[in-house]
Amino acid sequence: MEAQQAQISPRITLLQQQLLSGNSAALLAFWQEMTQQRVPLMEAIEGDGKHTLVTFLWRDRGDTHNVVIWGGPAGLDHPEDHQMTRLLNTDLWYKTYRLQTNLRGVYTLSINDSLTGQERGGFGTRFIPDPLNPKQFVAHKDEGMPDSQEVVFSILELPNAPAQTWIVPHPDGAKGKLHAHRLHSQILDNERRIWVYTPADYTERSQPYRLLLLFDGWTYIDLIPTPTILDNLVREGKIPPLVTVFLDNPDDETRNRELPCHQPFVNFLTQELMPWVHEHYHVTADPAQTIVGGCSYGGLAAAFAGLRASETFGNVLSQSGSFWWDKDPEDGIQQEWIIQQFIASPRFPLRFYLEVGLKEDVGWIFMVGCNRHLRDVLRLKGYEVHYAEFNGYHHNVSHRGSLADGLVALVGSVWSEYRLSQRML
């Protein structure tokens, strides 16, 4: 793992030399420079155009005992390996990594935590965003969930990371509307929130709208600004107007039971949710114009819904799908149950968009491998598969940019051909 190897920042080395030579003003000049430019500090590597040196910084207020980088290139274990080093006897703490120039992720800093574990008062109690980095990823408090709290991460975005232009609201563009509902399920014996996005100029006098169903509804509203993405894509003619259903989870325990290949959940989708959607909104019943999608367990659930209900869902959009999952797991062995089901099943009328981050492998879970395996199996079975990999982690900071890629892949090409044919008439 590239992050584990000790790296040396030329800029920090120069500063140390200046201080040792008696140039005490060099430190103040350094801090002034850092506040004026993007941080963390990024330095090109001579002769290596694919990597850069990234140095995380902390300015001591006089009470710092240790600083740990958590997340991003530091990962989520072994905090003792990702402590910053104090420069001489100054207020500057730092740690340098060699990273690929197209990487995107999030991280936090842990200040003065114990490094002995997660117990009360131990490591993990004092996370804060990087005060020197203005780029932040905010998970807002969900007022519908009593235990929800706002969480703020710092964004690590290297120069060649893919642009995320579709997530920025257009000041003059027409905007769709978001409608909140609640739906009780007799099949699942629970109730949940549902949001429905209708595009700008939505009307029931038109042809029925294409339909997009996304799991983890709050995630696709707060962390992945899907309404803004849809507004922008439609405005630029990249996709047709879509009605989008954001399906929420009653709680995390229910989510972890229902999303991983749970047949009663598919029954709920086809027998309760979709009839409710068709009753209340002017949407298509054509599976070829219907997309089911999600990320992580939601991507797994989307693939399972396609497998078991292709007469309802003809397109599957999976962002970092957890295809490693197994119904009866064996310790340390990745079973990939859903992939075995596709191998054993006949080919269904389905199209797929699959994506995964190259830094998503954690422990015995090989996210990249299982996504590539599903891709290969589907293609051998004759399915149309759009597949993509991004240089990032298992986090929505990447998914929010690539959702547009999935939508364009599944409906954009057909829409472009249709618009071209209309111009030729």
Image (spheres, rainbow, N blue to C red):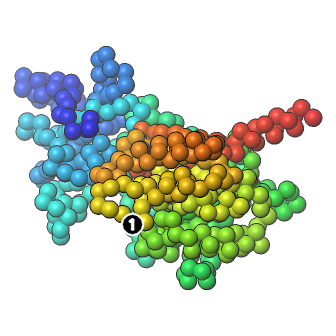
Q: Which of the pair 341/423 is nearer the observer? A: 341
From this viewpoint, which residue is outermost toward the top? 47
Which residue is pictured at 24% across the width and 47% down the height?
69
Q: Which of the pair 304/231 is nearer the observer? A: 304
Dividing the picture into quadrants, the one containing residue 415 is top right
Q: Is residue 413 visible?
A: yes
Q: Which of the pair 161/142 is nearer the observer? A: 161
Q: Is residue 293 visible?
A: no
Indicate whether 29 appears above or below 60: above
Which amino acid lies under the numbered mark 1 shown in the image of this protein? Asp
Residue 77 position within the rendered picture, expressed as x and y whole percent measured from the top left: 23, 52
Residue 8 position within the rendered picture, expressed as x and y whole percent measured from the top left: 18, 29
| Element on which disc 1 rests | loop
Indicate whether 331 appears above or below 8: below
In the picture, which quadrant includes the C terminus?
top right
Q: What residue is disc 1 on?
A: 328
Q: In this view, does 341 lie to the left or right of 417?
A: left
Which residue is pictured at 67% across the width and 75% down the height?
272
- Neighbour tally class for label 1: few under 14, some 14-19, many 20 plus, Cα within 10 Å: few
